[in-house]
Amino acid sequence: MLAALLALAAAATTPEGLAWLDENKNKAGVVVLPSGLQYKVLKEAPAGAKSPLVGTPCSCHYRGTLIDGTEFDSSYKRGQPTTFAPNQVIKGWTEAMQLMGEGDKWELYVPSELAYGDRQRGQHITPGAVLVFEIEILEVKGDSKPKAAA
């Protein structure tokens, strides 16, 4: 039952988004995970930095854009970091945050299957959209593990 619901919630990434991801994966510094999530390290936390567990709250700054550069959200613009745990956000963030450490700043390239799937979110995020996020973990506020070496 759960698998069927998850399958319904995940729309295929648009053809435009697939083409963008296919080109993006060849850019310098871009890492592609088996899930399809892509990321680039912008600022590296040291090995051994605190890395959150799935339910550990983290203070983060982030900026979200569409692949055309349209910004749809930014904690930087609000001047206030946001606190949430990896299990409280989209699947792409859940995966990335558990690989990141306190002090890391990454740019994430998130296929729709790991974002909002076939759901419209606000006025900018359309069904099947690939999303780009800059995310910075400022503080891991609880249980953690040491960040693995890159």
Image (spheres, grey):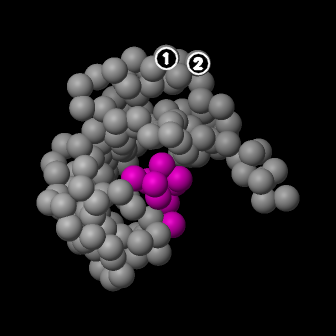
Can see residue 64?
Answer: yes
Which residue is tagged 1?
19
Q: Position of residue 54 (x, y in %)?
A: 46, 69
Q: Position of residue 148 (x, y in %)?
A: 28, 60
Q: Is residue 146 left or right of residue 88?
A: left
Can see residue 120?
Answer: no
Q: Residue at x 65, y 31 (%)?
A: 12
**Seen from this angle, which residue lies furthest right?**
1
Main SS class of the magenta portion in the image: helix
Which residue is tagged 2?
15
Q: Is residue 92 left or right of residue 2?
A: left
**Seen from this angle, which residue lies furthest bottom?**
142
Q: At label 2, which amino acid type do we have?
A: Pro
Q: At label 1, which amino acid type do we have?
A: Ala
Seen in the picture, residue 22 relative to 30 is either above or below; the reply is above
Q: Mark 2 Cα within 10 Å, few/some/many (few <14, many 20+)?
A: few
| Residue 140 magenta-highlighted | no
Give the extent of the magenta segment.
87-96
